[in-house]
Image (spheres, rainbow, N blue to C red):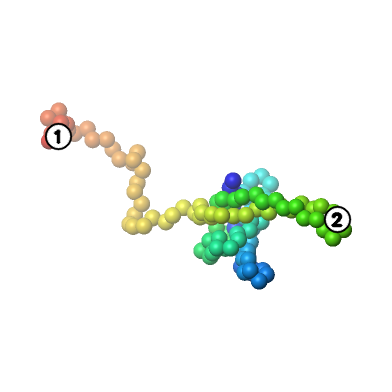
């Protein structure tokens, strides 16, 4: 599954317990009629995937839905859901790497000044 939108917030990496469990959260705002603010968590080594991203960037995040069952001290069963990210891609258009951009193909005039002999002068 995927979530696509603009980064609203990226949290700091949090470490929990003696085992060094790490978690980092990101909020992505979807771009639809009724935008949604979706919280996605990255865990363990995946927290580093967020290092090169900034609020305002358009991204696509590959996610897994996770669900847990918990019984509280009063014996009541509770259920929790989380959205875990495992890949993030920048959707910004890449800047041209060199020189002026190439004009579109329809900006060129067709060649009409060749003779029949010129047309098939290739050696193969």
Q: x%, y% of residue 63? A: 59, 51
Q: Quadrant of residue 118?
A: top left
Residue 111 — which label? Answer: none
Q: Earlier in the sequence, mark 2 or mark 1?
A: 2
- The answer to whether residue 111 is visible is yes
Quick check: marks 2 and 1 in contact, CB under 8 Å? no
Q: Quadrant of residue 10?
A: bottom right
Farthest top residue in view: 116
Q: x%, y% of residue 59? A: 55, 54
Point 42% across, 56% down: residue: 95
Q: x%, y% of residue 68? A: 72, 53
Residue matched to label 1: 124
Q: Can you tell which of label 2 and label 1 is closer to the viewer?
A: 2
Q: Is 106 rendered above or below residue 93?
A: above
Q: Is 38 rendered above or below residue 50?
A: above
Point 14% across, 34% down: residue: 124
Point 56% across, 50% down: residue: 62
Say few, some or many: other residues with alpha carbon within 10 Å of mark 1 (under 14 / 14 to 19 / 20 or more): few
Which of 18/6 is in front?
18
Residue matched to label 2: 75
Q: x%, y% of residue 11? A: 63, 65
Tell me the SS state at disc 1.
Answer: loop
Point 77% across, 55% down: residue: 70
Which of 13/105 is in front?
13
Say few, some or many: other residues with alpha carbon within 10 Å of mark 2 (under 14 / 14 to 19 / 20 or more): few
Tell me the SS state at disc 2.
Answer: loop
């Amino acid at each position: 599954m995927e979530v696509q939108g603009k980064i609203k917030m990226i949290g700091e990496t949090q470490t929990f317990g003696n085992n060094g469990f790490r978690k980092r959260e990101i909020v992505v705002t979807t771009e639809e009629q009724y935008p949604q603010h979706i919280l996605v968590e990255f865990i363990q080594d995946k927290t580093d995937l967020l290092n090169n991203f900034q609020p305002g960037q358009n991204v696509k995040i590959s996610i897994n839905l996770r669900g847990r069952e918990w019984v509280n001290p009063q014996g009541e069963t509770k259920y929790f859901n989380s959205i875990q990210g495992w890949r993030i891609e920048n959707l910004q258009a890449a800047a041209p790497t060199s020189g002026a951009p190439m004009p579109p193909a329809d900006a060129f005039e067709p060649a009409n000044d060749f003779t029949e002999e010129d047309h098939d002068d290739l050696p193969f």
